[in-house]
Amino acid sequence: MTAAAAKAPAPPPVRVLFVCWGNICRSPTAEAVLRRAVDEAGLSGRIEVDSAGTSAEHAGDRPDRRAVAEARRRGLDLRDQRARKVTPDDWRHFDLLLVADGTVERSLLRSAPDEDARGKVHRMTAFGPDADVVDVPDPYYGDGDGFVLVYDLLERACAGLVAHLRDRVG
């Protein structure tokens, strides 16, 4: 038996879905931030990332222009993302569903197919140094400064999530 044949198969990727209300501010931002953190950690292909909303109001829309502008300032590009609503298949496909706030969490949990699925739901900040920050504030109704705060918070949260998942994905 060769060394390659004896090597254990790679574990399946961990699949992460970020969820906010409309999927135009916080969750697409978190998706882009985590993608970059995964790439920088050399974990591409071992952690898959997507985002969705609990509302279909913005389905098909691009992220908020202020989120796009702050992303650009930080070297990220959100322009190809499109809002979508969480689907029943997401519960089967994703390992972690990370929510922005309590309202989103309650809405998402109402659609959970069973208790195991409910256990996949955590706050976006749960794995980072700001775990005591329960809600990622919704910057939609504020000015551009809210987007700066959200990015700062999500960058720290995603760095913590990558560190948390590193052992799990090998």
Image (cartoon, rainbow, N blue to C red):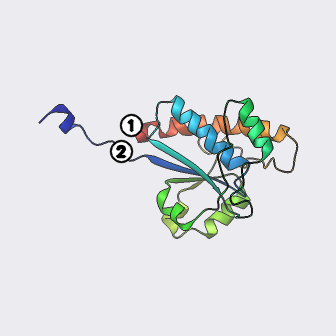
Q: Up-down: is 79 above or below 60?
A: above
Pinpoint residue 144: horizontal percent, then vertical percent. 85, 39
Give the crowd class for mark 2: few <14, some 14-19, many >=20 residues within 10 Å.
Answer: few
The residue at the far left in this view is: 1
Residue type at mark 1 is Gly
What numbered label is drawn on residue 132? none
Q: Which of marks 1 and 2 is nearer the N terminus?
A: 2
Give the crowd class for mark 1: few <14, some 14-19, many >=20 residues within 10 Å.
Answer: few
Quarter of the image where the C terminus is located: top left
Q: Up-down: is 82 above or below 107?
A: above
Q: Which residue lies at the image location 78% right of the left edge and 36% below the top edge?
A: 148
Indicate the quadrant where residue 109 lies.
bottom right
Q: Which residue lies at the image location 56% right of the left edge and 40% below the top edge?
A: 161
Pinpoint residue 54: horizontal percent, then vertical percent. 67, 62
Residue corresponding to mark 1? 170
Quarter of the image where the N terminus is located: top left
Instruction: Determine the CA span between mark 1 and mark 2.
Output: 7 Å
Whether label 1 touches label 2, CB < 8 Å: yes
Q: Up-down: is 104 above or below 75?
A: below
Residue type at mark 2 is Pro
Please indicate whether residue 15 sits to the left or right of residue 100 in the image. Answer: left
Please indicate whether residue 32 sits to the left or right of residue 163 in the image. Answer: right
**Residue 51 visible somewhere in the drawing:** yes
Residue corresponding to mark 2? 11
Q: Which residue lies at the image location 49% right of the left edge and 49% below the top edge?
A: 15
Viewer-side residue, 11 vs 115: 11
Q: What element carries label 2?
A: loop
